[in-house]
Image (spheres, rainbow, N blue to C red):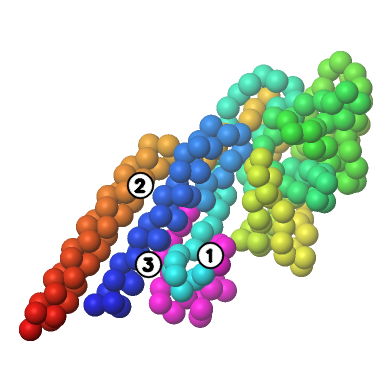
């Protein structure tokens, strides 16, 4: 009986984790460049299949036998007409300079700071092809399909857009930024990616589908909860009968 109860508790914890991830996805359904996370249950022989999984194991794998991974499918592109809004059509990430080193994003609703530096909405400098900050001083800004930045007819820099063979090691850092945790995969130029000025990439969260899945998870959790309650009541009655006999 105790083994069955432990199994039910484990399944409830897995459902809790799924609900937590789904809730975060829903909260970011309208966040520019956001990529949804998914949760799946691991098979019992998880240790032998981990190398083939794209995700992050929870700290206590024996307690919660599930794993998470980020779905990097393209989000819907929305036209804004803003010259500093840029979206990527295809694979790849914009390169961003942060206090923690280079990070990467699909969130292309950029701006200019007081120094004329191209930055993210959070103020992080956007990197050019040579790895330096992009300075813009002029009136008309054009971003070509290959990422070249042309100001008043003169090319000033090119967006540094890279892709990774090992996306499973990209760690979410917040604000739709990622840090590459694999030192052997620093990224390669995403030359085939189409850069589209005046567009932003929306979240790839399907809100209706996610809400439906959340309802299923809640129902599953409640079902496990009722089963656990029944098993506890049965166990209590069994012990009481044992005492009387």
Task: Specify few, some or many for label 3: CA neighbours under 10 Å numbering under 14, 14-19, or 20 or more.
Answer: some
Q: Position of residue 117 (x, y in %)?
A: 87, 30
Quadrant location of the C terminus? bottom left
Give me the residue at 51% from left, 59% from top: 68
Q: Position of residue 108 (x, y in %)?
A: 70, 34
Give me the residue at 44% from left, 79% from top: 45
Along the viewing direction, whichever of 48 and 141 lies nearer the viewer: 48
Query: Could you say which disc has been placed on residue 3 in the image?
Result: none
Q: Is residue 165 left or right of residue 240?
A: right
Give me the residue at 38% from left, 57% from top: 15
- Inter-mark Cα distance, 3 to 1: 13 Å
Q: Is residue 192 visible?
A: no
The answer to the question of whether label 2 and label 1 lie on touching residues, with beta carbons closer than 8 A, is no
Number of numbered discs present?
3
- Inter-mark Cα distance, 3 to 2: 19 Å
Q: Which residues are magenta?
A: 38-59
Q: Establish if 21 lies above or below 60.
A: above
Query: Which residue has dot 1 on it?
Result: 58
Query: Which residue has dot 3 on it?
Result: 10
Query: Which residue has dot 2 on it?
Result: 213
Give me the residue at 53% from left, 73% from top: 50
Of labels 3 and 1, earlier in sequence is 3
Determine which quarter of the picture holds residue 156: top right
């Amino acid at each position: 009986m105790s083994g069955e109860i432990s199994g039910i508790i484990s399944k409830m914890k897995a459902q809790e984790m799924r609900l937590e991830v789904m809730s975060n996805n829903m909260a970011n359904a309208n966040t520019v460049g956001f990529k949804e996370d998914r949760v799946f249950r691991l098979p019992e022989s998880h240790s032998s299949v981990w190398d083939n999984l794209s995700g992050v194991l929870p700290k206590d794998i024996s307690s919660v036998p599930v794993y998470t991974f980020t779905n990097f499918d393209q989000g819907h592109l929305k036209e804004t007409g803003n010259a500093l809004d840029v979206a990527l059509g295809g694979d790849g990430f914009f390169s961003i300079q942060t206090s923690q080193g280079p990070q990467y994003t699909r969130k292309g609703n950029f701006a200019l700071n007081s120094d004329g530096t191209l930055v993210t909405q959070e103020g992080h400098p956007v990197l050019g092809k040579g790895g330096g900050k992009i300075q813009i001083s002029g009136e008309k800004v054009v971003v070509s399909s290959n990422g070249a930045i042309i100001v008043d007819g003169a090319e000033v820099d090119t967006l540094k857009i890279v892709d990774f063979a090992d996306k499973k090691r990209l760690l979410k850092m917040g604000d739709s930024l990622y840090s590459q945790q694999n030192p052997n995969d620093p990224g390669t130029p995403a030359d085939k990616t189409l850069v589209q000025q005046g567009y932003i990439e929306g979240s790839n969260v399907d809100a209706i589908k996610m809400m439906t899945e959340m309802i299923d998870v809640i129902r599953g959790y409640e079902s496990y909860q009722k089963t656990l309650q029944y098993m506890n009541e049965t166990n209590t009655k069994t012990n009481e009968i044992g005492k009387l006999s």
